[in-house]
Image: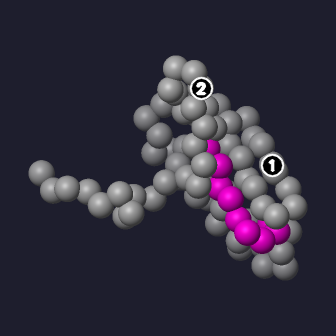
Amino acid sequence: MQAINLEDIDRPDVVALDKEGQVVLIAEVKGFPFKFQDTKNQEYAILRLIDYLKSAKTLITFTMLVDTQNILIFR
């Protein structure tokens, strides 16, 4: 078995756990507004969250997009 380099694993920017240690929220954080002229940044962040949700081995109740001006929480 080959060792995995943790820096190479794609993961959310923020992961919140409940008191039992279960993941209840994942978040993608950007240092610029999502309502930028180029909507590709917003689409990319949403697609990353979808990929995290698809690859999760459990149900994650909430996702969150955070930028310099907004916090968007999705159930």
Q: Residue furthest left?
A: 1
Q: Residue at x 52, y 27 (%)?
A: 22
Indicate whether 72 appears above or below 69.
above
Q: Is residue 5 magenta?
A: no
Q: Residue furthest top?
A: 20
Q: Position of residue 46 (x, y in %)?
A: 67, 57
Q: Which residues are magenta?
A: 26-34
Nearer mark to the viewer, of 1 and 2: 2
**Left or right of 69 in this view: 54:** left
State the SS at label 2.
Answer: loop
Mark 2 highlights which residue?
18
Q: Please name the amino acid that badge 1 sits on.
A: Leu
Q: Residue at x 60, y 37 (%)?
A: 16
Name the disc covering residue 72, or none: 1
With 35 as the anchor, is 30 left or right in this view?
left
* Picture quarter with the C terminus: top right
Q: Earlier in the sequence, mark 1 or mark 2?
A: 2
The quarter of the displayed image where residue 18 is located: top right
Structural crowding at the residue carrying mark 2, measured as other residues with C-alpha within 10 Å and reported as few (<14), some (14–19) or many (≥20): few
Which residue is drawn at the image coordinates 73% and 69% (left, top)? 31
Please give the name of the residue rendered at 82% of the width and 64% of the height, measured from the top-left corner. Answer: 68
